[in-house]
Image (cartoon, rainbow, N blue to C red):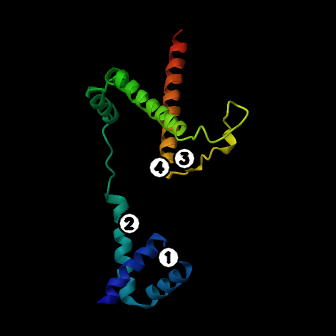
């Protein structure tokens, strides 16, 4: 029974041309010498030929594309983002980010010991200030990177709006 199940896949690979040259020679030898393989090969070959003759491919109607496009046109088109995005919210988020950055700068300046150094600039020498404690925090670095990326995105959006307004003129 196992040999029977093994015959068909190997013959289909032979008929479809998917088998290697060594397998093809082996199967040709089996077809020539074994009556069971020969009858199964003829049966599968007739079936393969009948597939090409009797099955017709279905084609869509001539108006298929037009019907699809008309169905899409009937759908409600979403309004432009400019109409449903509130600019006050965007400016509020931008203001919040700017205030966070300013707060971090003020915090960094507040951590400096202003009385520790004596220098030529009014009793203050920046070379003696240790900034490593402020900027080695991974969370602070990640926060700054995110703020820089958001700031660049905001600048890009502003410049693209300016470019659109310039093209209208």
Mark-to-mark CA distance, 2 and 1: 19 Å
Mark 1 surroundings within 10 Å by alpha-carbon count, few (fewer than 14), some (14 through 19), many (20 or more): some
- Classify 44 as above or below 81: below
Residue 70 occupies quadrant: top left
Q: Earlier in the sequence, mark 3 or mark 4?
A: 3
- Helix, strand or loop for disc 3: helix
Comparing 27 with 146, the one in front is: 146
Task: Tell me which numbered mark, 2 or 3, is placed earlier along the sequence.
Answer: 2
User: How far is disc 3 from disc 4 in space, using C-alphas?
Assistant: 11 Å
What residue would you read off at disc 4? 139
Camera-side residue: 135 or 24? 135
Q: Give residue 169's quadrant in the image.
A: top right
Task: Give percent across and percent down for residue 159.
Answer: 53, 23
The disc, 1 or 3, on the residue closer to the chain's N-terminal end is 1
The tag on residue 105 is: none
Q: Which secondary structure lies at badge 4?
A: helix
Comparing labels 2 and 3, the label whose residue is closer to the camera? 3
Please tell me whether residue 42 is drawn above or below residue 117 in the rendered image.
below
The residue that disc 1 covers is 19
Tell which of 86 and 44 is nearer to you. 86
Query: Residue 2: x percent and y percent?
Result: 32, 89
Give the distance between the C-alpha atoms of the residues marked 4 and 1, in whole angstroms. Answer: 60 Å
Q: Which mark is residue 134?
A: 3
List x then y, in percent, for residue 81. 36, 25
């Amino acid at each position: 029974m196992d040999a029977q199940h093994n015959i068909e896949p190997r013959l289909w690979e032979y008929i479809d041309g998917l088998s290697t040259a060594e397998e093809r020679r082996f199967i040709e030898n089996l077809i020539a010498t074994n009556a069971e393989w020969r009858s199964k090969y003829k049966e599968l070959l007739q079936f393969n030929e009948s597939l090409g003759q009797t099955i017709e491919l279905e084609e869509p109607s001539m108006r298929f594309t037009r019907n699809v496009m008309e169905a899409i046109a009937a759908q409600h088109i979403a309004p432009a983002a400019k109409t449903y995005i509130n600019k006050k919210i965007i400016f509020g988020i931008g203001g919040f980010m700017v205030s966070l950055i300013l707060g971090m700068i003020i915090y960094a300046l507040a951590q400096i010991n202003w009385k520790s150094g004596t220098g030529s600039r009014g009793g203050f020498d920046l070379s003696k200030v240790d900034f490593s404690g402020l900027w080695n925090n991974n969370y602070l670095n990640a926060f700054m990177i995110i703020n820089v990326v958001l700031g660049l995105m905001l600048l890009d959006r502003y410049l693209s709006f300016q470019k659109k307004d310039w093209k209208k003129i």
